[in-house]
Amino acid sequence: MTPRRFVGFVAELALLGLSLAVTIGLERLFLDTSYLSDLIVLVIASHGLAIVARRAGFGLAVAAAVSAAGMLVAGNILLFSDAAGSIIPSGETLTFLRADLRDAWTIFSADSAPVEPVRGFIVASGFALWWSAFLADWAAFRLRSPLEAVAPATALFVFAALLGADANQIVHGSAYAAGVGGVLLTMRADRQTREEVWVASGTGQGVSTTLRIGAMVAALAVVFGALAGPAIPGAGDVLLDPSNWDNGPQTRSVISPLVEINASLVEQSSFEMFSVKVDDPEADKDYWRLMALTDFTGQIWKRKSNFDDVRGAVDTDVGANVPRRTVRQEITTRSLGGIYLPAAYEVSNLVETSNIDLEYESATGALVITRESEARAAAGFTYVLESAVPEYSPTSLPASATAGLDASFVDEHTTLPPSCSSGGATPGECWPDNVTLLAQDITAGATNDYQRVLALQNHFLDPSNFTYDLDVALRHDVNDIEDFLYVVQRGYCEQFASTFAAMARSIGIPARVAVGFTWGDWDDDRQEYVVRGEHAHAWPEVYFAGVGWVVFDPTPGRAPAHGSEITGLAPAQLNENDASNRGGASVAPPPSTIAPGITGQPTIPGFGEELTPPTTVPVAGSGSGAGSGSALGVLLRAGVVLGAISFVLGFIPALRHLLRRRRLHRVAADPCGRAELAWDDATDALAVMGMVQAPNETLPEFTSRVERTGTRVGPLAQLANDVAILRYSVPADPVPHAIAAQSAAREVVRACRASRTFTQLLVDAVDPRTLRLRSYSPG
């Protein structure tokens, strides 16, 4: 079984597990569990049929028809065995069904949970669970939408929590949370097996580690919820409090070196990853390094590491004649995921680990948690270590970086894919010869390898050549090096560090990519550096014979805390001297250049109108609060049912509305950002009509393809032209182009909407495939 098939199978089991957790949670509605076996069989049957239909290649409509037929047969066999006929529902079955539903409604109107599990309730529950399982499978494996995959089960869980008895709340809550976590975890792993990446880590960051660590964390959550939960103050309070639902994303994050840099910088920027206490806040601050990637295959940067147990003193990889300074660090992990631990390079002595076993690889300076200690370390721990930080100077570097080095070492750290001009090279997996020529041209005036490396670094730092920008496309193959160098010329540390290291190798200089964090923000009250996701960083390291690995930094606005004599750069990180190393250039245009038409409240329309989140009916306390059998109680219960349905149907429009308002607010003062949003609006509208821009398709190519279809889509060419001007050039006044892009996008969206029927527009509004989860961050 291939990894992709295995992970897909595990994801299917996780989705089934969530449905079973919700099914068992319905016991709060009934006096006994005599019904439970029938509902479990129905849930398993529904998932099984959905899987079979999907794997057989049936379309959604055919799969739904097969599921409906299966539900009728399974329901008749399990719940109406006393009816005439065999496995096919008969007229007598319908007579029993009507009577059972009337009885159930009478009980629902008169009594509060828990109630007797009469057949009418079991039929209604089985119907809801059956289609919940089908919709979950559709969202998870046809739409690949994790949020929509858990939404049907969530609606049933909320229904049972609000109307059910106050029994086993902690247990059911923990089981539901574990189920949701399992679905999200396995779907993420499934996505990992399907995505091509440009840079990745070998050890501990793959799919198996994602599943293993996630399973451990989920197991700990279940155990904690079931055993320790009842002792927590307030455990007996209301299980679900809507006022506490919007608390932001989970603070737990999993860092896969370089691949997750974008997530750390953008999606989790404000969350504290770890903190560092040092003796001297100014002299001891440093890049907190996780590991280094040494192998470039043409598609990915990776490292296949070999770790050794570590206690006390650590072997060095730095030249014996290099002066050093000792930095003592007390590091406390908080939201730092993965197995890699931050430390100043290079670690020299491990002092204290809070009984967490660690391993170390001297070749890359990577400190990691052992497999046996991963579960205990997941909640965070404190470790103390010392680093012998090398202090290099230009005079200590040899003229030739490779003089006297072992040939195998040089080969390992200068290897590139086969040249694209060589026979048999695979397109997309070969090294572009023009990039080597560019590196040679940039370094032509240098007389030694140090000057060559410095020339490469300064080429990227020149604001007339490149711009620091988080909002870039994340395709990860060699072609993006050419796009980055010659077309886009925008990016963040991932692009700068990776391209620099590859270009250094192309001229015979050993290089690798290091991954970690800048030093973070000093907290006077806590007397320590606080390092957040926004401080995630990647930088290249270059090897000089007899000296060791030397840090350089080609990313504009970033520079190591020490080593200015080598890099020629003043220390810089986010919001700290971060304009000096890019010639004082500002990524975002100054507010004074923005015309009144594109400031203040956002005005660009989205695809369709902005939809207001659905209104929910408040529920008054427990079942007894409304009075048994009262009309008010019936209305409240009916309102809860409608609210649960509205939750599923209204989730996508509400989330789209909130995300878009957030992005509009963030780009209100940025003409380039407003134009990019206008392009996204237009391409979203075109996408629902089946015209999707390919990742490797340029703006003119996409526009030409759309126009060849003959579909009336409005001034798409004009929009593409204005976006291209703002994206790839620096106009003296970007505002007119932004306004023109907004106007053109509005016409494109209007033309697309005019070609859709009312039913199609309604389906588009709730279809999660139209949801674009972007997070634009100017500068």
Image (cartoon, rainbow, N blue to C red):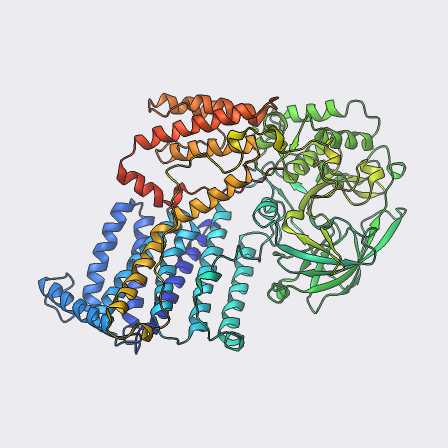
Quarter of the rendering containing residue 462: top right
* Left or right: 660, with 452 as reference point: left
From the viewer's side, name the closer residue of 227 and 158: 158
Indicate the position of residue 291 as horizontal and vertical percent values: 69, 50
Residue name at image x 26 percent, y 75 percent? 628
From the viewer's side, name the closer residue of 334 and 479: 334
Q: How many marks are shown on the rendered structure?
A: 0
Quarter of the rendering containing residue 298: top right
Q: Can the viewer see residue 773? A: no
Residue name at image x 61 percent, y 38 percent? 297
* Left or right: 671, with 513 as reference point: left
Indicate the position of residue 420 as horizontal and vertical percent values: 60, 26
* Left or right: 210, with 168 as reference point: right
* Left or right: 175, with 122 as reference point: right
Residue name at image x 40 percent, y 58 percent? 15
Indicate the position of residue 523 as horizontal and vertical percent values: 73, 56
Above or below: residue 501 compared with residue 346 = above
Q: Can the viewer see residue 116? A: yes
Indicate the position of residue 731 as horizontal and vertical percent values: 60, 22
From the viewer's side, name the closer residue of 61 and 367: 61
